[in-house]
Image: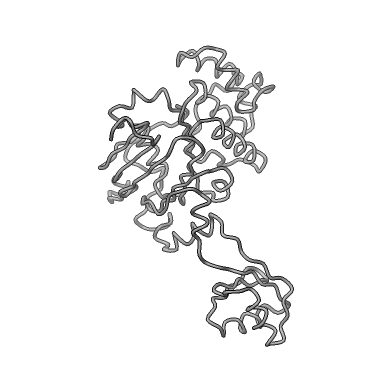
Amino acid sequence: MPGTSDLVVETTGLRKEFRTRRGRKVVAVDGLDLAVPAGGVHGFLGPNGSGKTTTIRMLLGLARPTTGSMALFGEPVPRRLPQVMGRIGAVVEQPKFVPAFTGRRNLTLLAHTVGVPTKAVDAAIAQVGLSGREKERYKGYSLGMKQRLAIAATLLKSPDLLILDEPTNGLDPAGIRDIRTMIRELGENGVTVLLSSHILAEVQQVCHSVSIIGRGRLLASGAVEDLVGEQQVKQVRVGVADPGAAQRALQATRWKVGRDGDRLVVEGAEHAEDITRVLAGHDIYVRELTPVRADLESVFLQLTHDTSLHGSGSAVVDDDTTDETTEGGAA
C-alpha cells in the first residue's frame, strides 16, 4: 500500500488464526477490510469476541497476522511501524502507573522517557479534564480518573491517531459521560480516534463513522447517519389496554407483531393510521402510537441476526485468549 494514502488506518484481507489452549484452530479475524479516514471519531463496533482487540493488537505490532496487509498513515505495518509510531497513541489495557506517585509525577516520568518537554504534561492534563486533581496520588483516583490519566499519557506526544479499546468498561454513568465528552472533543480538535466498543449507544453518541464487524468479518462501514438512514424496516410502538387482544387482531394481517413490555411493536404497516383502523374494527382503541426511530442498535441487530456472528458461537474465540502473550497499556 502506498505511503500517500488518505486513510489513517487501512487493512486488506486481514486474517488471524491461532490455536486455543485445547489445541483447536480458530479464526479471530477473517479477511477484514478496514478503512478509517482522517479526522473525527471512527467507531469499531462488534460484540465481545468479534475480533476487535485482536485487530488492534495486530495494528500495533503486538500480534502477527496470518495473512493480509495493514497500513497506518499509508505506511505498511508492522514493517514500517517504527516510522509512524510517534504519531500514534493507544490505550489497549490499563497501563501501569506508580500508585504512590501523583498523576502529574507519573506523567512527568513518562514524558522524560519518551523525550517530550515537561510542558506537554500540563497540556495533556488539561486536555483530559484532570486539572486540579493532578497532584493527588494515583492510588486514590477513581476508575474514571485512571482512564483519563491513561489517555493523557497517550496525548503527551500529540498523536495524530488515538486508538481506544473499550475505554468506558467498568465506569459509572458519570465517568462514561465524561469519557464520551472528552473523546468527542478530541475528534473535533483534529485527532483521528479509533474507538473500539461493543456498546451501541456509546458509538452512536460520539462517532462520525463506524465499521461494524461480526466474527472477525466486516459487516458494514460508513457514516453513522448513512448507516442508520439505510435502515428500511418501519416499526411502530403501540400502547393499548389489552395487548394480547390487540396482538391477535394485528397478527391477522400480514404485519409482524412483537411485544415490548406491555406494548406492541408492529413492523410492516405502511401507515400508522392503518394500525388504528384495524384495532378500532375490533373495538380496541389506541392510547399510544409511536414510530420507532432507526438507530445504530437496530442496524446492528439487523446485520447480526445470525447468532453465529455474536461472541457465543463455537468458532468464535474471546479477544483476550490468544497464542501470543502481550502486555497492553498506553502507547
Residue 202 versus residue 158 in the image, above or below? below
Instruction: Return the x and y of residue 257 as percentages of the image width and height.
Output: 57, 75
Residue 184 image point, x, y percent:
58, 37
Screen quadrant of the C terminus? top left
- Left or right of residue 128: residue 310: left
Relative to 229, 11 lies left or right? left
| Residue at image point 50% right, 16% down | 111
Q: Is residue 148 above or below residue 274?
A: above
Quadrant (top left/top right/bottom left/bottom right) for the N terminus: top left
Give the residue drawn at x 45%, y 31%. Answer: 161
Residue 36, quarter of picture:
top left
Point out the residue furthest to the left here: 67
**Looking at the image, how many numbered discs can be counted on the residues?**
0
Residue 217 horizontal/vertical position (percent): 36, 51
Residue nearest the viewer, comparing 212 with 312: 212
Q: Is residue 78 above or below residue 125?
A: below
In the rendered image of this protein, does residue 138 appear above or below residue 254? above
Residue toward you, 74 or 193: 74
Residue 189 location (% of width, % of height):
56, 30
Query: Residue 148 is drawn in which quadrant?
Result: top right
Looking at the image, which is closer to me, 275 or 260? 275
Coloration mode: one colour
